[in-house]
Structure formats: structure tokens, C-alpha cells
Image: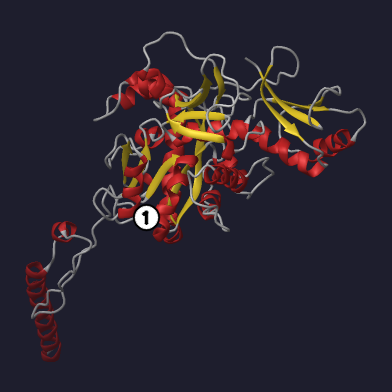
Amino acid sequence: MIRRGFVTFVLIGLILSLLTLVAWRAVDMKTTLLPDVVSATLDADEPVETIESPSGPVLHVPAPPPENQTKTRVLERPLFVVGLGWDRLAPALLANAGKAPSKASSFSPSGLAVSVAPVDGLPDVIEALARGGGQEQGADVAIVPLPQWLAAQDKLQAIDPVVFYVAGWSHGREAVFGAPRADVAAPDDARPVRVGFKDIGPAYLALFGFDAEGITPPDISLIGADADPAPSWQAVDVIDFEASTRSDVRPSMRWTTSQASGLIPIVMVASRSWTETHPKALVAWLRGWLSGVGEVSGKVAEAARQLGRMDGAPQPLRLMRGLETWEPCSLKENLALFELDGPDAQPLRLVMRRTWNLLNRSQLAAPVPRALPISADIVKAASRARLPTDVGGTTAWSGVSVADETTGGQHVVLTRPLDDIDGYELARELAALGGAFPSSVLRVTPKKKNGPVQTAFELARALSSVPQTVVLADPNPDLSTAATIEVLLAP
């Protein structure tokens, strides 16, 4: 009996001791517990100090993840983009909801902040790229028409700039017209053709057209538009020309890039080292760019009004005209241009070499380098990232389809004389003209029936990848050369 009472007393004592110990530990833990509020306010980049207590380690209570977690950034600073004109930067400006980085930007979901700077002159583009995106008023990426870029590309050899994407094609911005009764066959001054110009793009259109007709750059004198005596031909920026002339009478256009809509690409440029070290940032840039292209497609007037409300923008009417004078290029077309997928009549390397060669022969650009400044890495990466391939395209702005008109209602806009030629060379000539004039019909007229030109034509037509119709006309014995290629377009 005594033993049972003793055991009971001991058990009661042990229970009371255990309860006392638990109560004491609970009080101690309450004073050392770190609330979630403190840990939630700490910056993720700041080190967290471990707090020790005489009673033991601190207990950290796990907090639920924040509702708006920060996206992984592909670039620790904004991507700075510069370009010639508001119209050519329109997809980026609309996707970015303005020039400055914005939470409403279509680039943000990809973890990229973007700053867009439209400028009026090529020197501003060159200076921005020279500074680089890490400097004030600098840029990582430039968007500029290819002829203008090639005329100044040698000034930036130190950063090794490359073309990494084709944004689109000029479509009616450049034009060449002649004074009344102007005749390319009539000598003028020391050279047969005098062409007034202010901008490189229109000058290149003139050089291409005259060279195709057999008048080479050494026989073309490029002079100031206001030279005295007035030149017989003028190469103009259509929008600037319309703004500067008060006459309601429009001159007769010899060529425009609305006809030669495959002649002048608008390209994206960055230093080679930057494209190699920041592919994710440039893929994110292209994803947002394509989103902006979709915002403009079929809604030019609405897009122009939206751009016109941004700080420093031109008037909506000028923006509308600017948007109407170029057409975007899809990722699918870029894959072909960079020779990564499918045949292309005129891949980018051939377009660049032809452009550079004509500008150099006219003393408007440095000699053509052996290795062209082109990089296909970003287009490859964009394709691997499964960016939409069909956004954009050469008719995306207006939704106009190219009519396949092979008979009637067409006129000759360019005639190229040909000497004796084989099928391979004729195929190259057809590809060059067909690529520059994608909605044309190409007509080959031989001087003799059943001669070598006719045989070459059959081979060239089999080799040609140009989409438009290529036809063989009846022989013309009055030709002064073995044959001609005529570019026919609807008026």
C-alpha cells in the first residue's frame, strides 16, 4: 500500500515537471519567433542575418509566395532601340505602349524592358550604336533601311555590327521621276544621266533601275537635288517630297518601291558580340515586335492615331503615310531570307551584296567585304523558341493581295538588254529582277527564233524560283542585243 502511494506520488511529480518545462519553452519560443511580415519585407538581393537566441535556434515560419512574383529578367537593364522615323519603329512603340519602359508593355511578360528612340537622321543612329545600350543616349539595336545602313556601316567597324533580322520592305517610300521630256539616252553634261538626290535610299533605287537598263554607275552623276542647272532626274523620299511641294500636279514616276517592293529591306542591326551574348534578350525583343506587328495589321489609321498621342510624335496624317510606305516581314520569310528554311529567289546575302556593290561603284559606300555582316543566330533562336512564323508578311499592313495578271492592262517599267547568255546566267537575271519586282511579269524577247537565248530561257524557267510569271515573247529582229527582259506591271 505504501509502495503504491509512493509510485503515484512520483508519477504526479514527473507530470508536473513536464508541464512546467513545456510552458517555459513556449514562453521562450514566443519571444524568438520571426514573423512572416519581417521576412516578406526583405529585399531578395539583401543578405539575411541569422538571429541566435540563448535558448536555441530561431524558428522560421514559411510564408506563402507573393501573389505577383517577379518574372525572370533576360536583361538586367532596358534594351535600348533606335531607328529612323516613328513609322518604321511603330510595332515596337505600340507593343511597348510608348517610348519608355512600361508595365503595359508586351515585352514585359518575357522579362524584358525596352526603351525606343525614333530619330530623324542616320548620324544619330550611328552615334547611338557607338555609345552602346549601357550609356546614356546609346542603343543596342538599330532599325534602318539597308542602303542607308551600308553607306555608313564602315564607321562602326570597331563594334562589328551585323544584320540579325529583316523587319520589312520599303513599299513606296522611294521614287525616281524625270523632268518633262527627260531621256536617259540623251547625254547631259559630262555623263549621260544626272540624278538629284538627298537620301541614300532613293538614290539606290535610281542606281538599280538605270544599271538594269544598261547605264552603269560610272555613267550616272549623283548631285544635289537643288543643283544648277537642274538635273533631269530626281530621286526622292516621297513623304518629304509631298510635304515640300505645293503643286497638285504630281510628276510622272519612272520607278517607285511600290513597284520594286522587294528591293530595299529594312533591317535590324546590333554588334556581333552583343547578339552572341544576349540571344534570349533579342528573342524576347522579336516576340514583342511581332506582337506590335499584329497590332498594326489592317489598322493603319488606328495605329497612326495611337502613335500620334505619344510624346513628340509627328501628326497622325504623316504617320499614316509613313506606315503605308513599308510592309513587315514575318519570321517565316526571315527563315528563307537567311537561308534556313525553304528556297528564296533573292536571299539576304545576295540582296546585300547587290546593294553594297552598286553603292560602292557610285562612291556612296566602302568596298564590299569578303564576309558579309550577317548573323542568322537570332532567327534560328527565334524559330527554336517557337515564335509565331506567320505574323507579318508583305501584305500584312493593308491586307492587299498581289494579283496574278498575265494578260492585258500592263505596261513596261524597265527593260534590260541582254547579250548572248546561258541558262544559268539568265536564271540569275530573272531572279534579281523578279525578287525586286515581286508582283511583275517578266517577258524575255529574243532577237532570233530558235537561237541560244530561247534554249537558255527553257533552262532558266526550270531553274527559276521567282513566283511571278515568266514568259517568252516572239522574236524581235530589230533588237540591238541578243535579247531583252521586260518588267511588266499593272498601272
Q: Residue at x 9, y 84 (%)?
A: 9
Residue found farthest to the front: 190
Q: Is residue 195 above or below residue 427?
A: above
**Mark 1 lies on residue:** 74
Asked if residue 203 lies left or right of residue 92, the reply is right
Q: Which of 38 and 448 is in front in this view?
A: 448
Which of 294 and 179 lies nearest the eye of the viewer?
179
Residue drawn where x is 86% and y is 22% of the image: 474
Residue 335 seen in the current view:
yes
Give the image location of residue 234, x and y in percent: 48, 25
Q: In which quarter of the image is residue 488?
A: top right
User: Residue 36: x, y in percent?
Assistant: 17, 59
Residue 391 showing in the rendered view: no
18 versus 391 height, above or below? below
Badge count: 1
- The figure's colour scheme reads secondary structure
Dividing the image into 4 quarters, which one contains the N terminus?
bottom left
Query: In screen coordinates, is 338 left or right of 98?
Result: right
Q: Which residue is drawn at 37% across and 41% down?
A: 122
Residue 284: image location, x then y, percent? 42, 48
Q: Quick one: 69 or 93, which is closer to the camera? A: 93
Q: What residue type is labelled 1?
A: Val
Q: What element carries label 1?
A: loop
